[in-house]
Image: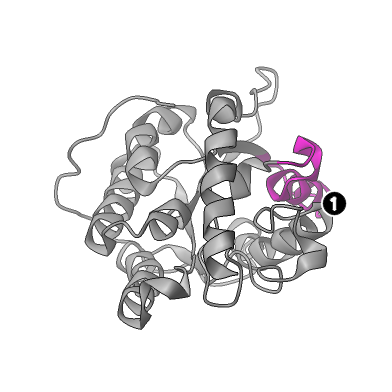
């Protein structure tokens, strides 16, 4: 069953690839509210659901209901690895986001890519954001690797997110798919991507952390003031679900 689900992940990613250059939500030039930019995979892009049902759009509803003046920009790209995300960060920072939310690594885990490379890519993304003026506040979303890659890989993969968040003074969402991964009724027929109901839970999971960053409801984590040079930044390009799984694209 696990192998079949992994095969389904790969098939879903290939099918999603043609959408990769269309997932960035268009910006309203008349909207001057500070931006919260979500850099992510198809989990953020909302593959298989209406854009209004994806968790970033639901977070916009929560922001509005709370009377907070921010606009959400969904910059999710289907099939993206952390290396791909690294090449887009400089471009996304041109929007001068007030908050940058980083959801990356799902496809690295799905493909069994190097954990060291994931760490380096995430480090570069966060360091580049730290060096940007004006400097955005940072939120890192954690992910899990598939269990078939072994405990050592899964443990090392999991540790990347809290360690890099701490290193860069970012808030951490420990696991995006908490209470959704592996629940048939909350995932689409591919068993990978959340349904609208699943996205509602994702939104709650992320909002629990994000709200503390934008409404002054919690102490702001300490910020680093310096970081080694962030190199190799380029311009734009384009589950197996259980508590220990990776999730895709």
Q: Secondary structure at mark 1?
A: helix
Q: Is residue 237 left or right of residue 128?
A: right
Which is nearer the eye, 65 or 20? 20
x and y percentages locating residue 52 in the rendered image:
80, 39
Q: Note whether 215 is above or below 172 in the view shown.
A: above
Which is nearer the eye, 56 or 96? 56
Q: Residue at x 19, y 36 (%)?
A: 232
Q: Note whether 238 is above or below 138 in the view shown.
A: above
Residue denoted by label 1: 65
Q: Residue furthest bottom?
A: 151
Count of all numbered marks drawn on residues in the image: 1
Q: Residue at x 49, y 65 (%)?
A: 143
Q: Note whether 54 is above or below 234 in the view shown.
A: below
Would you say residue 47 sits in the magenta stretch? no
Q: Residue furthest top?
A: 29
Which is nearer the eye, 125 or 12? 12
- Which range is magenta? 48-71
Q: Is residue 67 left or right of residue 147?
A: right
x and y percentages locating residue 71 in the rendered image:
68, 38
Query: Could you say which quadrant of the image residue 133 lies in?
Result: top left
For the N terminus, the quadrant is bottom right
Residue 198 in view here: yes
Q: Residue at x 81, y 55 (%)?
A: 66
Q: Residue at x 65, y 23 (%)?
A: 26
Q: Residue furthest left?
A: 228
Query: Could you say which quadrant of the image residue 173 lies in?
Result: bottom right
């Amino acid at each position: 069953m696990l192998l079949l689900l992994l095969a389904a992940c790969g098939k879903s990613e290939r099918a999603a690839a043609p959408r990769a250059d269309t997932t960035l939500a268009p910006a309203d030039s008349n909207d001057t509210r500070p931006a919260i930019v979500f850099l992510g995979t198809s989990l953020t892009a909302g593959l298989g659901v209406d854009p209004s049902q994806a968790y970033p759009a639901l977070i916009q509803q929560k922001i509005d209901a709370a009377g907070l003046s921010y606009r959400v920009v969904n910059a999710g790209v289907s099939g993206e690895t952390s290396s791909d995300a690294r090449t887009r960060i400089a471009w996304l920072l041109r929007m001068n986001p007030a908050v940058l939310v980083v959801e990356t690594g799902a496809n690295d885990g799905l493909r069994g890519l190097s954990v060291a490379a994931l760490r380096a890519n995430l480090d570069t993304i966060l360091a580049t954001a730290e060096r940007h003026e004006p400097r955005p506040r940072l939120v890192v979303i954690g992910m899990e690797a598939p269990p078939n890659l072994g405990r050592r890989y899964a443990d090392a993969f999991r540790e990347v997110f809290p360690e890099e968040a701490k290193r860069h003074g970012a808030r951490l969402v420990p696991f995006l798919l908490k209470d959704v991964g592996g629940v048939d009724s909350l995932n689409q027929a591919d068993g990978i991507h959340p349904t609208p109901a699943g996205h509602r839970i994702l939104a709650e999971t992320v909002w629990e952390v994000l709200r503390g960053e934008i409404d002054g409801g919690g102490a702001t984590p300490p910020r680093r003031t310096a970081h080694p040079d962030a190199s190799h930044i380029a311009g734009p390009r384009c589950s197996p679900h259980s508590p220990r799984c990776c999730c895709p694209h």
